[in-house]
Amino acid sequence: MPFDERQAVNALTVLTRLAQREQDVGEWIHRALLADPAGLLGPAIQVGVETGHPMPRVVDVLLGEVDLPTEVLVAARARIPPYTSALQSTAALITGMLLERGAVAGTPEGVGLAAEHAERLLETGDLDRAVRMAREALALARPLAADHPHVLLHAARVLSACLSVAGDHDEAIHLAEQSVGLLTQLRLDGLAAGAAAWYALGERLLRAGLSDRALAAFDRAAVAYGALTGAPAAAVPPGRTVPAVPPEEVGELYYGLALALLGRAQVLDDLKRPAEALPAAVRALGMLRERAAQAPDAYGLAHAKAVLATARCLASAVRGDPDGAAAAAPLVLPYLMAAALQVLEDAGVRRRLDEVRSGAAYLAGLVKSMSGEDPDPFVAAVDAQVDLGLAWLADDRPAEAALAAAAAVESAQALIERFGEVGRLPLQRALMARSRIRERAADVEAALADAAEAVQTAAHDLDRVVAAHTQSIRLGRAGRGAEAFAAERDAVEHLIPLYRPDQTDQVFAAVHMTGRLFVLAEEGDRLAELGDDVLRFGVSVLTSFPGHRAEARILDSLAFIGFGAIRAYGARDDPANVAAAHRALTALTTRYPAAEVLRDARVMAAFNAIRCHLRNGRLDLATAAYEDVAALAEADGGTDEAILVEQAKCANVLLNVLVDVDFARAAELVRAAGPALRSPAYLAVLPRMGEDDPPGYLEWLDQIASGQGVVVDQDTDPAVLATLDADHRATLAERLRTMGEDHPATLAVRINLAEILRLRGLRGEAVAELTAALESYRRVHGADHPDTRAVEERLAGL
């Protein structure tokens, strides 16, 4: 059933909020819009206005993929407010499409569309295209000027603005003067259009540095707006109260008057006339603040610029007009940092890098210079700069992002100088953000330096955990595996005392970090470098993981932890902890039966577990580990060759011990594991495991299964004895190395070798082997044990 408008907006809002935390969700939004692009474009634009990133980017992609009807584009364009910054690129795309289709060519509406497109391009920083489109709009407007002079004026104003930003001040001023002249000729200069034209001329002159002429133009604009509104254009002296304009009377004309007064104040400040500049700025600020309170989205930026302009006038007036400055200060200072940040953000949206650079420096300077005992506003300013830098990075604006991050670091350092420890967390965040931005710019060494400094800046263990983990990621991407491992280990070690298994977010963070640590340890053969506390923590993470749905990457991490812990404990000959880790991994597999990665880790870990148990004389634990693999193979039905091979490997290593210490159990094992041991998949890998005679191996299995074993006596062929001699020597050497001389499996092979040596006539070597075996039995069992006496009797018989 299709969504109605409200349901579509709600659903897309939820997806957008999710996408702000999880990057992959952006693709979900894209697929949802593709299901009904014409019906969902309008709701998507509304969500983009209200919620922001990443909806505007997804909509832009959609517009490039789907050929939507003109009426849909017109309706969508009408839903984009002129003041929004989030959808400026979208508005430019839609307007460009409509112009290409020529739906309103040769009409006033077409000229307006072209001029608006130029404005949108200017707002998004595409200056060259903005100038070209504005010239095209003006050319289209000229033939219509006689009947539609306002169309010509609009096009001329837009082109003038584009040229002014581009630095072509002469043509920009010329166009603005022509507009004023045309309005005067038409006797419209006293109306709103005339006031706006004078203001535009003042802006062009101010940008060109022609202060005296700019002041005259702003004065004309203020007088015109004042006459239209009935408000006096003259400035009110500082210290006096300006009556608040009733909300119902506040309209666009008051907005224009405020801008004209603000322009006048800026020029007066440039002319070193602070006593006149500050009252004008204060009056403009009051009017714009009221407008912004009523419609913050539409007028918030204008208010922010007014705050900064008034602040500059205030700084100039401190010496010349201290009373006026003191009266104006409460109107400016509480809003200053927020205003600076808003203007900085707007400069980034418009891709005006010089303004971003100066705005970032200004904001950093505020943190250094502003007074106050409460650090919270300053902390908020640093955090806001960090967020802004990361947002610009997400929008693929690395230059702006770098400037914002650098300013954030500078501000945070100033914060530490003023407030001490309270500035460490903001500085850490700023360093981590700058590290990420520098990494994107391929400035690897600088990125790594920031990441390392962020770790050292951490004030608390949890902060250090986050910073060290981030540092490890940076180092890993830079190909520095050993350093990445050390940083991740540092993160996990600091996480251990903070860990709360009853807090789900901590559990998932612990799984992710610990899993990554075990991956790095495996890749660099560094399992031995993991401390006992880290290994214990890894197993505790397995046992405390909650039994609900988990993402694939979490299950991957759990598998790495379980497998790595078993391998690490096995290398330390710690069968008890190997068994504990194996049980934890088995329990997880039971809770997540569909998670093949957990099952595979459990199967592969069994081989390492069995070898550890056998080396340490724990035949019981080795048998239990094998039975676990056998149960998995039986549940699989023998269809998975990988599981079958692992079962056979586990059975074979266990069989090699049982055949010497408990032949009956060895025969039982061969019969039970026969399908795996005799499978083509296992026989194919035997040569890689050192067995170069698969037919001989099968014959050996048949002998064990039949209860015959390998029987030697005086009639055994000498060639067979020689082969058995070599095999037993190799086996003895291996068991001495891995199990030690007192292990039952080692002693069994040693006694068998002595018998083979006797039959070959090598009495001296046979005596040496039995003597060594007798010494082991005496150490392990004592002189009176039956097994010890049996070896003594065999030795005496030689």
Image: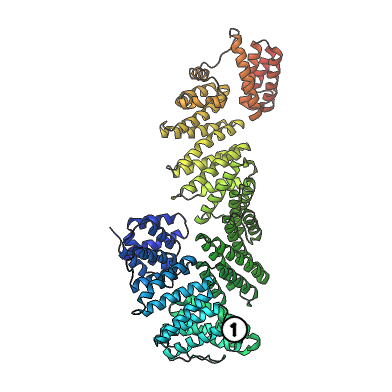
Q: Is residue 463 left or right of residue 671?
A: right
Q: Is residue 582 left or right of residue 133?
A: right
Q: Horizontal and vertical percent for residue 287?
A: 48, 84
User: What residue is pinned by disc 1?
Assistant: 269
Seen from the viewer's position, the closer of residues 126 and 239 is 126
Task: Give the image quarter of residue 714.
Answer: top right
Task: Give the image quarter of residue 8.
Answer: bottom left
Looking at the rendered structure, the secondary structure element under dot 1 is: helix
Q: Is residue 714 visible?
A: yes
Q: Is residue 729 left or right of residue 301?
A: right
Seen from the viewer's position, the closer of residues 411 and 357 is 357
Q: Horizontal and vertical percent for residue 351?
A: 52, 66
Q: Measuring 60% from the left and 66% from the top, which residue is drawn there?
A: 408
Q: Measuring 47% from the left and 27% from the top, which residue is drawn there?
A: 681
Q: Measuring 45% from the left and 76% from the top, which residue is drawn there?
A: 157
Seen from the viewer's position, the closer of residues 181 and 622 is 181
Determine whether 91 is above or below 220 in the image: above
Determine whether 513 is above or below 108 in the image: above
User: Which quarter of the image is occupied by the C terminus?
Assistant: top right
Q: Callout 1, which amino acid?
A: Asp
Q: Is residue 739 visible?
A: no
Q: Horizontal and vertical percent for residue 74?
A: 33, 67
Q: Is residue 398 left or right of residue 777?
A: left
Q: Horizontal and vertical percent for residue 55?
A: 42, 62
Farthest-out residue, left = 1
